[in-house]
Amino acid sequence: MRGFTRPCRFTLIMVFAMALSAYAQGSNPKVNCNGGGPLSTINGALKLLNPQGPNTITVSGTCKENVLIQSFDRLTLIANPGASINDASGGTIPVVDIEDSHSVTLNGFTINGGADGIDCSAASVCYLQANTIQSSLGQQGVGVGGGSRAFLNGNTIQNNTLRGLTVNAGAQVFSNSDTFSGNTSAAIVANSGAYLIATGSSILNNGSDGSAGIVATDHATLRLISCTISGNKADGVDLQHGSESAI
């Protein structure tokens, strides 16, 4: 038995050194949610990464998990065709929760269910590109708050139980060519000093509960450029409590 001690120790040291090297330099893991092992979940892959980045995770398959991205910088999640992230909490927490993180990108996912589909909070900077965020059960499909900034481009935010997008608590959202449709309440609510600029986005057929397409309240600011606002249950844009808009 003694003859096997050194090779085993040497192997363990080499594996540990390789893991440290990958951690220090950033990594590009490939997650297959239809497979097994530590790279069968996004949360499992996040545990292997250096939070300082840069890191890119490529995701395939149907993921059933609630993903927490906390204190990460320069992180990109890219969906292979058909990849989705589906709520595993019974609608009690967000499907993707981004907190205290900078330059986090989600590209090409279908996000299903959750209390919210995606939350960007605690002074984070989030980039959402070409995602479909739908069927959330809580307040909104996408929530941006706590001084965060979110850049949305080419997303579809649809069929959420209440709002499509909420921007609050001094947060800023820049929407470009996004579609907000079929949300039961307002497509977009900006409140509490929030700032929203939308260019070329579409706000269509929202507010079956009687809400306007876009609601700005409590000193929020809207800037709408070349947007299409149509078919919403109440007014296209509703300004309240010291809010202002340029259309």
Image (tube, grey):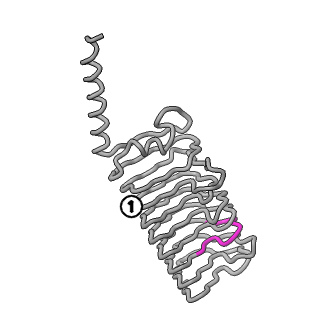
Q: Is residue 184 magenta?
A: yes
Asked if 137 appears above or below 47 in the picture, the reply is: below
| Residue reaching furthest to the bottom | 242
Q: Viewed as shown, does residue 203 lie left or right of 197?
A: right
Q: Viewed as shown, does residue 196 lie left or right of 213?
A: left
Asked if 16 appears above or below 212 in the picture, the reply is: above
* x then y, percent, for residue 128: 49, 60
Which image quadrant for residue 102?
A: bottom left
Q: Does the magenta stretch include residue 132?
A: no
Q: Tell me what residue is drawn at x 59 percent, y 56 percent.
A: 93
* x then y, percent, for residue 157: 61, 62
Which quarter of the image is occupied by the C terminus?
Answer: bottom right
Give whichever of 69, 82 is nearer the camera.
Answer: 69
Q: Tell me what residue is drawn at x 61 percent, y 62 percent.
A: 141
Q: Is residue 197 visible?
A: no
Q: Tell me what residue is drawn at x 56 percent, y 45 percent.
A: 83
Q: Magenta span covers which residues?
A: 180-189
Give whichever of 112, 230 is nearer the camera.
Answer: 112
Q: Can residue 146 be seen in this view?
A: yes
* x then y, percent, for residue 137: 67, 59
Residue, disc 1: 102
Q: Which amino acid type is shown beneath numbered disc 1?
A: His
Q: Viewed as shown, does residue 11 lie left or right of 40?
A: left
Which quarter of the image is occupied by the N terminus?
Answer: top left
What predominant SS class does the magenta segment belong to? loop
Asked if 206 appears above or below 16 in the picture, the reply is: below
Q: How crowded is mark 1: few (under 14 residues within 10 Å), some or many (20 or more)?
A: many
What secondary structure is marked by label 1? strand
* x then y, percent, for residue 39: 46, 37
